[in-house]
Amino acid sequence: MSTNKTTATPVSVDEFIAAVPDARRRDEAVILRELMERVSGEPATMWGPTMVGFGTHHYRYASGREGDTFVVGFSPRKPALVLYGIWSEYEPEKYPLVGKLGTHTTGKGCLYVKRLSDIELGVLETMVQQAVAEHREA
């Protein structure tokens, strides 16, 4: 059975964010870190080389594969901010707040935002609160 490629690392989140080349993306990473730390109550941890995660979640698939990942997190990538953990699999009817979020795109398990100024941070905060609560109930 294969092992999870994305695991928590001892790399400094502060150093990672400080090294983000684009100043706007770097500032957005600081804002997301503050929001997710406050909402989750968990400190930021690097997962793999580019993802900042908050909390831990153990998963087990029907196939028997299992591992640990973060509850919510983000990656300040060049084309977009990638937000993780907002949903395990996007189903529009299950996440009505996404319609109030602002300009974004969705992936199966991710939310992509080109600029934080394009979205309503209050809506994002509520979505993160709901995601964290779902994991705590599970």
Image (spheres, grey):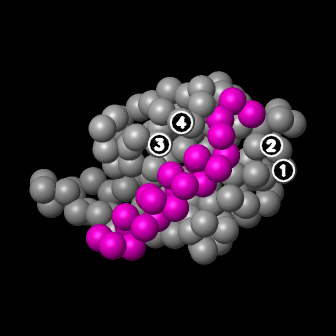
Is residue 135 rendered magenta in the image?
yes
* Label 2–label 1 contact, CB within 8 A: yes
Q: Residue at x 38, y 67 (%)?
A: 135
Look at label 2 and name its amino acid. Arg
Mark 3 → mark 1, Cα distance in angstroms: 31 Å
Look at label 4 and name its amino acid. Lys
Q: Residue at x 19, y 57 (%)?
A: 61
Secondary structure mostly seen in magenta is helix
Mark 2 → mark 1, Cα distance in angstroms: 7 Å
- What's the mark number on residue 106? none
Look at label 1 and name its amino acid. Ala
Is residue 111 rendered magenta in the image?
no
The residue where tag 1 is placed is 18
Is residue 79 at all visible to an observer of this figure?
A: yes
The residue where tag 3 is placed is 97
The residue where tag 2 is placed is 26
Decide: is 137 above or below 124: below
The residue where tag 4 is placed is 100
Look at label 3 and name its amino acid. Leu
Decide: is 91 above or below 10: above
Mark 1 → mark 4, Cα distance in angstroms: 31 Å
Decide: is 42 above or below 126: below
| Residue 92 screen position, x and y as percent | 34, 35
Q: First in sequence: mark 3 or mark 1?
A: 1
Q: Residues within 10 Å of mark 2 (few under 14, many from 20)?
A: some
Residue 5 versus residue 33: which sits nearer the camera? 33
| Residue 98 screen position, x and y as percent | 47, 38
SS assignment at label 3 = loop
SS assignment at label 4 = helix
